[in-house]
């Protein structure tokens, strides 16, 4: 693949991701994608079979980029407890960023009824990666049941995202962080 082809593909995916995040998958028609990206329909179809393929590729790239950012921000802590609490600090900065519209994966999964649809599967994969990361951190603690702790922390993360977006509560991540801190004190006293 030459550089021009890669640039065109990247432009299509970047535009598709922005459109999906702003307005949802159903609002991102091929006509809108052509107009917004400035890429000819023929060029889009040279890279992707249909709108669903474009959406799936855009969401997959968003997953990789978001997880890399989230891990990088969270991993700034020196101890597992600090890294766990940093997850909520990272969310706060995301919530306060321009254009925050909640979780792209929750939003798009809500648009698709079929649990086997590729978009739903990408959303599920994203949440599984997030759970795996939280479990990785919880597993570094000396706790009896790191799996249960990781699932509880994931609920706090997801709840904070939802409260911030739906309710406009910019303190949701801070509130969830405080609950997480209390949980960590309970499961690993003296740490």
Image: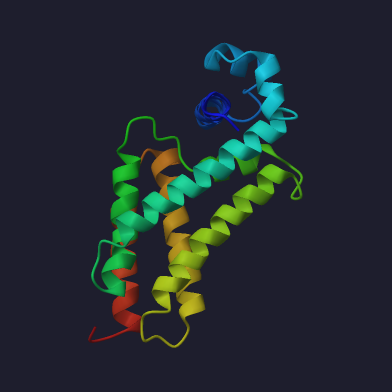
Count of numbered labels shown in the rendering: 0
12 in relation to 137, above or below? above
Residue at x 35% of width, y 74% of height: 183
Residue at x 48% of width, y 84% of height: 145
Residue 172 visible (yes or no) = no
Residue at x 58% of width, y 26% of height: 5
Hey, which quadrant is residue 88 in on the image?
bottom left
Residue 1 visible (yes or no) = yes
Residue 163 x %, y %:
42, 46
Residue 153 in the figure: left or right of residue 26: left
Q: How is the image coloured?
A: rainbow
Residue 25 x %, y %:
63, 30
| Quadrant showing the C terminus | bottom left
Residue 44 in the figure: left or right of residue 131: right
Foreground pick, 115 / 12: 12
Residue at x 62% of width, y 38% of height: 57
Residue 148 x %, y %:
50, 76
């Amino acid at each position: 693949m030459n550089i021009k082809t890669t640039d065109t593909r990247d432009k299509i995916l970047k535009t598709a991701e922005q459109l999906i995040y702003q307005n949802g998958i159903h609002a991102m028609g091929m006509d809108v994608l052509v107009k917004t990206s400035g890429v000819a329909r023929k060029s889009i179809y040279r890279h992707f079979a249909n709108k669903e393929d474009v959406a799936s590729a855009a969401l997959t790239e968003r997953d990789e980029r978001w997880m890399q950012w989230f891990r990088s921000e969270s991993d700034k802590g020196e101890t597992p407890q600090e890294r766990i609490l940093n997850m909520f600090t990272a969310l706060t900065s995301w919530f306060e960023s321009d254009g925050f519209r909640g979780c792209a994966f929750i939003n798009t999964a809500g648009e698709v009824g079929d649990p086997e649809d590729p978009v739903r599967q990408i959303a599920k994969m994203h949440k599984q990666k997030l759970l795996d990361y939280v479990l990785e951190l919880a597993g570094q603690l000396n706790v009896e049941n790191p799996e249960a702790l990781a699932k509880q922390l994931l609920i706090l993360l997801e709840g904070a995202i939802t409260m911030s977006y739906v309710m406009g509560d910019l303190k949701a991540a801070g509130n969830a962080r405080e609950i997480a801190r209390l949980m960590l004190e309970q499961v690993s006293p003296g740490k």
